[in-house]
Amino acid sequence: MKRIYVNEEWCLGCHLCEYQCAFANSGINDMVKALKGKTIHPRIQVEGGNSISFAVNCRHCSDARCIKGCISGALSRDKDGVVVIDTEKCVGCFTCILSCPYGAIMPSSDHSVVQKCQLCMDNQMGEPACVKGCPNRAIVYEERI
Amino acid sequence: MNYDYLIIGNSTAAVGCIEGIRENDREGSICVVTDENYTVYGRPLISYLLWNKTTEKNMLNYRPSNFYKKNDVELILGVRAEKINPDKKTILLSDGQEIGYGKLLVATGSSPFVPPMKGLDTVEKKFSFMTLDDAKALAGAIDKDSRVLIVGAGLIGLKCAEGISDRVKSLTVVDLANRILPSILDEKGSGIVQKHIESHGVKFYLNDSVAEFKDGAATLSSGKKIEYDAVVIAVGVRANTSLVADAGGEVNRGIVTDLKCRTTLDDVYAAGDCAESLNSITGQKQVLALLPNAYMMGSAAGVNMSGGEKLYDDAIPMNSIGFWGLHVITAGDYEGEAYVKRDGSKYKKLVTSGGRLRGFILIGEIERAGIYTRLVREQTPLDEIDFEAIKERPQEMAFSRAVRKDDLGGAK
Ligand SMILES: Cc1cc2nc3c(=O)[nH]c(=O)nc-3n(C[C@H](O)[C@H](O)[C@H](O)COP(=O)(O)OP(=O)(O)OC[C@H]3O[C@@H](n4cnc5c(N)ncnc54)[C@H](O)[C@@H]3O)c2cc1C
Ligand code: SF4
Ligand code: SF4
């Protein structure tokens, strides 16, 4: 399946992907209204500082520990292989945060459930907004075997 | 009837097993027998149900409603397996049926342990807190005037307290131990979480026990008297091992299994809370009664039962639990050198031994905890990573460029 991959050497550390992610998942059409003056809770996180930086988000593992350990069955894999969360079922126990080896799943803004990257298949974008918005191709959306 | 695969118990380990079998074998017939009257639900959700954080419908959606059909599983509800006959390869059910198996999985979980307590038989409203029916019975017996006494300050007793807190007048918890949650926390951690739970109105009597129940009041060993309208017993659980023991299989605290999840009986496997497995940190066999482990062990058993090969050799104790918004994540154990950071109700303890991370406790600040879990599970040599950085916070940056490249750029 197509996944998001990181080209660490190209990352500028500009955090634009985080803003694109927050905007894409805000449900608001106007970027200024969606983001201005707000603390963002993106599903992608840029690590690092001046010399090295890179973005981390869900790897959509084929052997996903988060799914196996979820106490409510809120995490599952959809027909395209995307690891998705059903926030109706999630009870916010954070067992998936304990389980994910990459630290790629996180509490939602009010901490009542978790949120994770779903490759923008759950919003209006239809393709990962972070990848589209990255100015230096430091994250790409492609098939790798 | 005769099935290629027969499973006793219909909870998380059973689901892992079914999904594991179906990775290899789409055709073989599968039958699941359970003495509960529900399709599978996430057992830990019973407290969230009472706290109105989920609904029964959502709970019973642990797997989609077409799960049994899609996986071609015959489900027998409300019937107990009474006996395994390993020579004939059959099991006997409480309704008199005898069912044959090719491979059998015992996934019977555990039962509440109720120690003898003076006068307990006179308590009219007393409950365990293990099943959906337990939760419903408890909910039906309490109201906003109820004073509830919970015996046991472990995970189940305290989750129960949280679950019913908005429905009752008062909650008192008694435990023989001198601190709460001793199975997952150190003393400092216990203190922090206890204080938080107390701030939500729960009263604790630790280092104490019920000497006698009489006329709606419990007299404690310390002499203290507590009036109650209902009592919940949550002192501990015992693995359900008797089916295997009676059939001549080896059991300790749990059913003895090898790395392929086989019991000592031919073609009989065991997984989940009823079974012992290898704690890969200590090298000891023990019951690791946790839902993720039940899934993983069940799934390994399923793969092995259906002709595949999967060793269940990377299990560790690990737990994530929250009380009134304060989250606690722990893994491994705490035998070693500790690095501790405390800031109000936030607490972090990382324990290293032999140059490896052996266990950790995170309270309050739990973000990206899985990176620590990974270090424990994989026993990563700490000199291969930037341990100073990762002590501060879990991060990919602490790994070498090569590891990062594989993590973030490698096919998954
Ligand atoms: C209140 C509560 C909260 C919990 N919270 C957490 C948590 O936050 N995180 C976590 O990781 N774990 C938690 N756990 C533990 C978790 O629920 C278990 O680890 C998990 O359910 C184990 O799954 P299992 O399939 O091994 O067995 P179980 O879930 O125990 O299921 C076994 C099933 O087998 C049935 N059975 C037994 N004997 C027979 C028989 N002879 N014939 C037919 N059927 C039989 C039983 O009725 C039961 O339905 C909690 C448990 C409880 C009770
Ligand atoms: S959340 Fe973590 S464990 Fe789950 S699929 Fe994504 S990267 Fe893998
Ligand atoms: S926080 Fe939600 S998604 Fe994560 S394990 Fe708990 S119930 Fe499942």
Image (cartoon, helix red, strand yellow):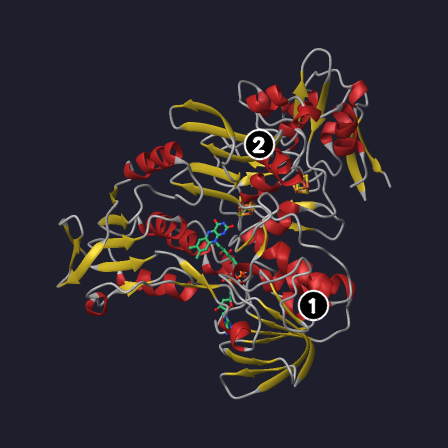
Q: Is mark 1 within 8 Å of ligand 1?
A: no
Q: Chain of mark 2?
A: B
Q: Is B388 above or below relative to B164? A: above
Q: Which label's residue is closer to the chain start, 2 or 1?
A: 1
Residue B317 image point, x, y percent: 54, 46
Indicate which disc residue A9 carries: none
Pointer 2 and pointer 1 on the same chain: yes
Question: Of circles 2 and 1, which is in front?
Answer: 2
Disc 2, SS = strand
Q: Chain of mark 1?
A: B
Disc 1, SS = loop
Residue B230 image point, x, y percent: 24, 60
Residue B321 image point, x, y percent: 46, 43
Which of the two residues, B284 or B368, is positioned nearer the viewer here? Answer: B284
Q: Residue at x 48, y 28 (%)?
A: B348
Report if residue B327 is visible in the image: yes
Q: Residues within 10 Å of mark 2 (few under 14, many from 20)?
A: some
Q: Is residue B14 left or right of residue B70?
A: left
- The residue where tag 1 is placed is B71
- The residue where tag 2 is placed is B353
The amino acid type of the residue labelled 2 equals: Ser
Q: Residues within 10 Å of mark 1 (few under 14, many from 20)?
A: some
Q: Is residue B327 left or right of residue A83?
A: left
Question: For residue B133, which quarter of the picture?
Answer: bottom left
Instruction: State the count of labels.
Output: 2
Q: Is A120 above or below relative to B99? A: above
For the C terminus of chain B, the quadrant is top right
Which of the two residues, B310 or B365, is positioned nearer the viewer here? Answer: B310
Which of the two residues, B303 or B95, is positioned nearer the viewer here? Answer: B303
For the N terminus of chain B, the quadrant is bottom right
